[in-house]
């Protein structure tokens, strides 16, 4: 459940938020409520969008008080995002895209559906096509390649690390603020029926970081939270998870904003 609210904040610069007709400076905040969440959390995207993740019981007054307590952090993050705009691809001949951690060059004149070879993604387009047409073609190619790749890898890792639980569903989509989620309830036999929701951007990451995300989500099969038990399990599945988390911060800032536009 998502709804958008506005909060008055004493912003240091008018450019950091919208001016209302009355001259008040306000900032939009997306409040995302979840029955699984037990506490309030803040997220500021690479585009400067502010999101509060809240349990169902948190009303607007509690969200406002939470924002007020973290006012300085929010303003700093929003200012940083506005001062350092994210990567914007050049949609057309000579532009580039990311695939498996490598930058690939976009080119026209390709066969129907597109093909990647020697670092060049050739698509059935030309200089006469619009930026929107280039973007749609690139993302369609990415999805066609990413879906079987990610499904196969997730199934293999699940079979290696999560039996006897059952992987019932893998949902792949573009997401703007998370690499993936894991959900599932235990049955009468003690086994979980697991659903993985994965970001299509995983196929743009270096394979080792893609695996790091998948292993993070699979650690949730036994621990549906981020408590001490979860991190013990994660350390078994991926002893280098801390290093991978640092590298993923760069990739999330680079890629997530494109799914939010």
Image (spheres, rainbow, N blue to C red):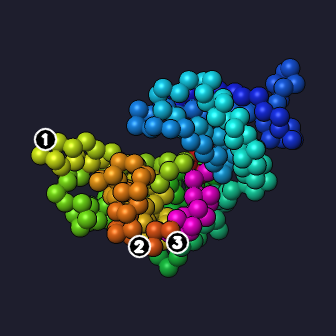
Q: SS for tag 2? A: loop
Of 51 and 190, nearer the camera is: 190
Residue at position x 66%, y 51% from top?
46
Q: SS for tag 3? A: helix
Question: Quick one: quadrant of the C terminus?
Answer: top right
Magenta includes 255? yes
Q: Residue furthest top?
A: 22
Does 68 sit above or below residue 257? above
Residue at position x 69%, y 38% from top?
69
Whole-percent x, y for residue 66 in the image:
64, 34
Magenta portion: prevailing SS class: helix
* C-alpha gap between disc 3 and disc 2: 9 Å
Q: Is residue 104 in view from this perspective?
A: no
Location of mark 3 (residue)? 243
Residue at position x 18%, y 49% from top?
191
* Left or right for 114, reference 229: right
Asked where in the image residue 94 lies, by quadrant, the reply is bottom right
Q: Are marks 3 and 1 in contact (CB under 8 Å)?
A: no
Q: SS for tag 1? A: loop
* Left or right for 104, reference 147: right
Whole-percent x, y for residue 167 in the image:
23, 52
Location of mark 1 (residue)? 188
* Earlier residue among tags 3 and 1: 1
Can you tell which mark lies on residue 226?
A: none
* C-alpha gap between disc 2 and disc 1: 32 Å
Location of mark 2 (residue)? 239
Q: Residue furthest bottom?
A: 118
Looking at the rendering, the stretch of residues picked out in magenta corresponds to 243-257
Of 256 and 141, nearer the camera is: 256
């Amino acid at each position: 459940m998502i709804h958008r609210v506005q909060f008055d904040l004493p912003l240091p610069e008018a450019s950091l938020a919208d001016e209302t007709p009355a001259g008040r400076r306000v900032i939009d905040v997306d409040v995302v409520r979840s029955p699984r969440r037990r506490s309030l959390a803040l997220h500021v995207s690479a585009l400067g969008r502010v999101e509060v993740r809240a349990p169902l019981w948190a009303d607007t007054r509690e969200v406002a008080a939470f924002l007020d307590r973290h006012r300085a952090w929010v303003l700093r993050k929003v200012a940083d995002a506005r001062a350092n705009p994210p990567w914007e691809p050049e949609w057309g001949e000579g532009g580039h895209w990311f695939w498996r951690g490598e930058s690939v060059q976009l080119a026209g004149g390709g066969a129907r559906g597109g093909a990647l070879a020697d670092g060049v993604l050739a698509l059935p387009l030309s200089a006469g096509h619009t930026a929107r047409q280039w973007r749609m073609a690139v993302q369609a190619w990415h999805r066609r390649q990413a879906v079987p790749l990610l499904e196969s890898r997730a199934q293999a890792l699940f079979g290696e690390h999560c039996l006897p639980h059952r992987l019932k569903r893998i949902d792949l989509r573009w997401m703007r603020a998370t690499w993936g989620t894991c959900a599932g309830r235990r049955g009468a036999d003690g086994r979980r029926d697991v659903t993985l929701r994965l970001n299509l951007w995983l196929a743009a990451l270096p394979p080792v970081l893609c695996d790091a995300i998948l292993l993070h989500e699979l650690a949730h099969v036994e621990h549906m939270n981020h408590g001490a038990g979860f991190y013990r399990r994660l350390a078994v599945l991926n002893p280098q998870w801390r290093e991978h988390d640092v590298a993923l911060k760069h990739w999330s800032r680079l890629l997530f904003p494109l799914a939010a536009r």
